[in-house]
Image (cartoon, helix red, strand yellow):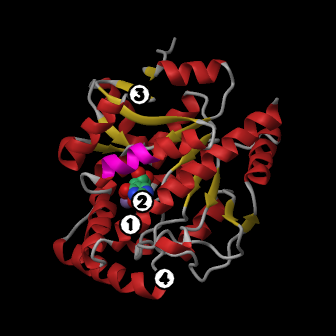
Amino acid sequence: MTLPPPLRLSPEVAAARSEARPLVALESTIITHGMPWPQNLQTARAGEAAVREAGAVPATIAVIDGEIRVGLEDGEIEALARNGARGLAKLSRADLAVTLARRASGATTVAATMIAARLAGIEVFATGGIGGVHRGGELSLDISADLYELAQTAVTVVSAGPKAILDLERTLEVLETFGVPVIAVGQDTLPAFWSRDSGLAAPLRLDDAGAIARAHLMRAALGLPGGQLVANPVPADAEIPRAEIEAAVAGALADAEMQGVRGKDVTPFLLQRIFHLTGGRSLAANISLVLNNARLAAEIAGEIAKQKA
Ligand code: PSU
Ligand code: MN
């Protein structure tokens, strides 16, 4: 006999589920570890609002006191934002069961949010950028669990591409090996988080939410495990071109090396350093792309609901 998962849907999310209305999952690590206060709270709220405006119900996901919570109250989102990385652990696939067993709390990464979304029956998830193969990953083997999750959990993840702090070519190679479709939206090149263009060809391209929804349903029809990675370019007015951001990325990587930053701390450390090195521009781009992804994810969820009906 197995225990039921300690999963709690908010009343609004539960109602949307039972009425088969479109839902979009949102992660919490971006709130606690990805952005500084108070922009983290503003972005979390604006992300939920963007999902609603585009006709879907938002479900921000976190682990609170030994429960996977799907759909949080505004006060709970504010508490995550205020506590941040000092107060909350960053939970990925490996951490989830132990944290729940200890009846503890934490913020969910892309990997852990995908697991929770699937348990809650949510098929679409919006984030900023996914984790991937870190630069030097061929030696350090620092490869985000997000990639492995995309290989096995059937959720469509809307991102602005892998974060440009990564080795993008090796990230694409691993995703190809795992059979994860990487779909650029409306262009032939892979977006790279803060920049619209990574300079790398995108493995796949689709141009609208309806087509992405059809591909999502087709994977299910084929019985394929795993999700889709949608790479939606950052809006042009907020982007930092590749040549400009690369200097900040290089500086941040050098700082991380010097300070011996390892493991889970690498990504939050780099994002914070890049924020300082760009005089805050990286954060403005990050916020803009998150909201843009929330809108597209809501449209995809709406199309999935329509095409299933
Ligand atoms: N997207 C953002 N900011 C973030 C993240 C994504 O715009 O902080 C988080 C996600 O939770 C993602 C994590 O899963 O960074 C990747 O961490 P790692 O490289 O340690 O797997
Ligand atoms: Mn890592």
Answer with mark 4 or mark 2, whichever residue precedes in sequence: 4
Q: Earlier in the sequence, mark 4 or mark 1?
A: 4
Q: Residues within 10 Å of mark 2 (few under 14, many from 20)?
A: many
Q: Earlier in the sequence, mark 3 or mark 4?
A: 3
Residue 284: mark: 1
Q: What residue sits right under mark 3 in the picture?
A: 68
Q: Main secondary structure of the magenta part?
A: helix
Element on which disc 3 rests: strand
Label 2 close to label 1 by CB (< 8 Å): yes
Find the distance from the CA under tag 4 to the CA under tag 1: 14 Å
Q: Position of residue 262 (x, y in %)?
A: 26, 63
In percent of width and height, residue 109 lies at: 41, 47
The amino acid type of the residue labelled 3 equals Ile
Q: Calculate the distance from the C-alpha at mark 3 to the C-alpha at mark 4.
A: 38 Å
Identity of the amino acid at label 2?
Ile
Question: Which residue is pictured at 68% across the width and 72% down the height?
Answer: 202
Residue at the image point whose x is 47% and y is 62% from the top: 288
Q: Nearer the viewer, mark 3 or mark 2?
A: 2
Indicate if the residue with disc 1 has its beta carbon within 8 Å of ligand 1.
Answer: no
Does label 3 or label 2 sit earlier along the sequence? 3
Q: Quadrant of residue 293?
A: bottom right
- Which marked residue is nearer to the observer: mark 4 or mark 1? 1
Q: Which residue is mark 4?
A: 241
- Does residue 240 appear left or right of residue 272 in this picture? right
Tell me the quarter of the picture where residue 19 sits: top right
- Going from N to C along the chain, the mark reached first, 3 or 1, is 3
State whether residue 21 appears in this view.
yes
